[in-house]
Image (cartoon, rainbow, N blue to C red):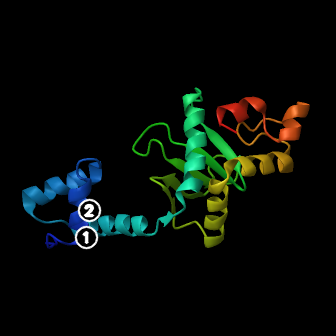
Amino acid sequence: MLQLKSNAPEIKWIIRNAATDDFARSLDKRLRETGELTENMVSAVARILNRTASAVSVDAAGVDRIVASFNRAAESGLKYPKMYLGEFTFALAMSGRNKGAIWVTEGFTRGGRYLGKVADGKFAASDACTPAERAQVLDVCADPKKAAEAFGKETGRCACCGRELSDPVSIANSIGPICAERYGF
């Protein structure tokens, strides 16, 4: 068992997040009851703090564009908004603890390697995300419309729904007209 000083970063995180995070709430309860935490509990909080510290901030305009596109898609009635941009799949979390966050995975099939999420005005890269991938994700976040059009030109499929572009207008725009409207392009 470890006894931490009240100004330790781990204790500050627990107190700050106890109202909104189940894990922090359980640790706060234990601290109040026993005044101690196990080494594993403290190291889990330290890992959370390290992940938060490694989050990369991007300019607000870049993040705002991709967030606005996904919000507009959700408002249009899409149940699970998703886009294929660059070499990545971006998917909006519609429920759960990270509701509103945009998950980023590698590739275009289910089960792609998790690279991070766009939330709270920044891209929080996972440990598995390389610096080159991080830069590519940030480029896509800066201009999702341009990335969607590039995906359509390269693959002949809509970046939003994945369907083949067959209509001449869709082919010319490199994105389907319904998807373009839903995502605000």
- Residue positioned 48% across, 55% down in the render: 121
Quarter-of-image position of residue 139: bottom right
Can residue 80 be seen by looking at this rendering? Answer: no
Instruction: Give percent across and percent down for residue 151.
Output: 78, 49
The label shown at residue 37 is none
In the picture as drawn, the residue positioned furthest to the right comes out as 168
- Say which of 91 and 140 sits in front: 140
- Residue positioned 50% across, 64% down in the render: 57
Element class at badge 1: helix
Determine which residue is flagged by label 2.
13
Determine which residue is flagged by label 1.
9
Give, as a three-letter code, the residue at label 1.
Pro
Element class at badge 2: helix
Can residue 7 be seen by looking at this rendering? Answer: yes
**Do the residues bearing badges 1 and 2 touch, measured as CB atoms within 8 Å?**
yes
Report crowding for label 2: few under 14, some 14 to 19, many 20 or more residues within 10 A (C-alpha).
some
Instruction: Give percent across and percent down for residue 161.
Output: 71, 36
Q: Is residue 79 above or below residue 172?
A: above
Give, as a three-letter code, the residue at label 2.
Trp
